[in-house]
Structures are given as C-alpha cells and as structure tokens.
Amino acid sequence: MLVSIITPSFNQAPFIGATIDSVLTQSYAHIEYMVLDGGSTDATLDILRSYQDERLTWISEPDQGQSHAINKGLRRARGDVLTFLNSDDLLLPHAVAEIVQYFEAYPQADALYGDVQLIDATGKQIGQMAGKSFVLEQALTGGQPVTQQGSFWRRRVMEHIGYLDESLHFTMDLDYWLRIALNGFTLHYLPGTRAAFRKHGTSKSGSLQSGFLYDWQRMLDKIYHELPVSSPLHALKPESDAFVSWGWAKTYWQQRDYARARPLLRAFLGARHRRTRRMIATSMLIDSYLHTPFTRTLALLTRIATGREILYGDRRAV
C-alpha cells in the first residue's frame, strides 16, 4: 500500500528539516513524499537539496497559497492512502505503519484521524489535542475536534469528492472532512498520538483567528447552500452561525474592541444559548465595563481543571 504525503512549504527553514526527517525515518518505507514549496527565499531550498532519498521529490515555484500547493501534490500523488503534513509539524515514529495496518484491517474505513501532540518551536511537548468519534452534527456546529495532523484518507475519497477548496486558507481541512461525511464516506477516530502540531509565533493557526472565522462562515454558507432542501441538517444552521458569532465576540473582546464585542456578547445572554456561553458572555461584559479580571481568572481555572481553553486558540465550541 503506497502512502503519499504532501508538505506545503514557504520560508520554514527553521522547521522543515525536522518535518522531512519525521517522514523519511518512518518504519513503513513504502512512502511517496512531496514537498511543494512556494518559492522560499530563506534556507529552505538548501535544506531540500541536502536530501538524497529517492522517496522525496520537491518543487519550488510561486503558488496561490497552502491549499493550492497541497492540491498540486494531490494531483501528482500515486498513493493508495493520502495525507498532507505542514512544514512545521511532525509525524511521530511508526505513525504510517499504524495507519496502514488499520486501513488493511478495516477496508470500510475511508478516512482516519487520531490525537495530536502539541510542541513548541524547540520541539518540546507542551500539551495534547484529543480527538473523539466523528459526529457530523457536532462538526457543523464547531464541537468536533478532527485533527489534521496525522489524518489520512483513501484515494477513493479523493476520486469522488475531489481536492481541497482553494478559496479557503484556514478551514480547508475541516471543509474536506465535512465533504467526506456528507458524501457518505466514513471517518474513523483511532485513539493514539501519531503526529505533532508545532505552535510558534508565526504558525498560521496560532496568530490569525480572524482569518479562521471568515473562512468558517464562508465554508458554512457554502455547505448549507449545497445541502438538499429536504435535509434535516438545515435545522443546525442557527447553531453553526452562533459558533462563528461567538468566535468574533471573543476575538473583539481580546482585542479590547468593546464597541463591536458588546452587541455580540449581549446576544448570547438569551436562554436559547448554551449555559456556558451565557456565563462567559456575562463575565466578559462585566469586565469590559469595570476592567475586572473575572474572565481571565475563569479561563485560567478552566484550563487548570479541564485543559480547555475558553479564550485563545480553541476552534471547538465552548
């Protein structure tokens, strides 16, 4: 079973060597590995030239962003199983062997994901992202942690649903999982950590929350527009939209843009919204007027007690 792994890259010289090593040192050797570089101006090309492994091929030329680069690789891929790995993330030892073993044992599984280790710029472990069994309704409303790092899917999925949506630059992975499920394919959650997500100052998901929110809304509007009129999933649209509004409320509040945050926060005080959101919205409103630390204290206690982050960097619903 050939496994194709694609890494989109642009000016990631401090990290890309570790990413490549994590792929080429896998215990499963039947790998096709492609790095699609967007024309880096740092030392990336010198690093790429230093590898002589015939399983690795690379291209460096201007592209139209991460999704476009991944699709370039997918169109070239010959593998029975496919994935992409960002140029600052890692595959953990034996990850590919475990994935292949599972796909061979469960031929009905179309896509597979697990848990993800969080590391910092130096590679030190700083946390964990836990997955759970896929539920489409939760994915549509922001409560489904499908981790991209360490996720794999069969060629038959791509042959049916096509490639990543290149108009999306932040949520193209979630959009792909939703399309997989909406087209009748199965996503299996396999507990275990097989990849690492590097959080650092320039990582996209660590610094551009507004971009995620714009993409989330565009992605949701597209999906609901394409659903059959008779689909019961249309009933979830208000909750899906509320997830995005809640994200904007938190983003504006964190930016101290209270003029835009307060109307959104007040909208979450109604009984039809989740109790946790009502509580947090109340605390944020109080803090915005009195400059008290209630919300940040609540966030700290929640982080200590549950590991959940109610303010920063959490794309799941709270």
Image: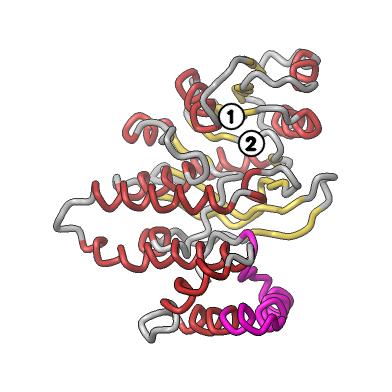
**Residue depicted at 57% across the width and 62% down the height:** 251
Does the magenta segment cover residue 106? no
Which residue is at the far front? 259
Dot 2: what SS? loop
Regarding residue 1, the answer to whether it shows in the image is no
Q: Amino acid at mark 1?
A: Ile
Front position in the image: 98 or 213: 213
Measured as percent of width and height from the top left, residue 234 is found at 24, 61
**Residue depicted at 58% across the width and 28% down the height:** 6
- Left or right relative to 217: residue 112: right
In the picture, the disc for residue 86 is: 2
The residue that label 1 is drawn on is: 5
What is the chief secondary structure element of the magenta stretch?
helix
Q: Quadrant of residue 59?
A: top right
Q: Which residues are magenta?
A: 285-313
Q: Amino acid at mark 2?
A: Asn
Measured as percent of width and height from the top left, residue 299 is found at 67, 76
- The span from disc 2 to disc 1 (Cα, nearest Å) is 10 Å
| Circle 1 crowding by C-alpha within 10 Å: few under 14, some 14–19, many from 20 | many
Which residue is at the far left? 230
- With respect to residue 277, does 172 lie above or below? above
Q: How is the image coloured?
A: secondary structure
- Left or right relative to 222: residue 100: right
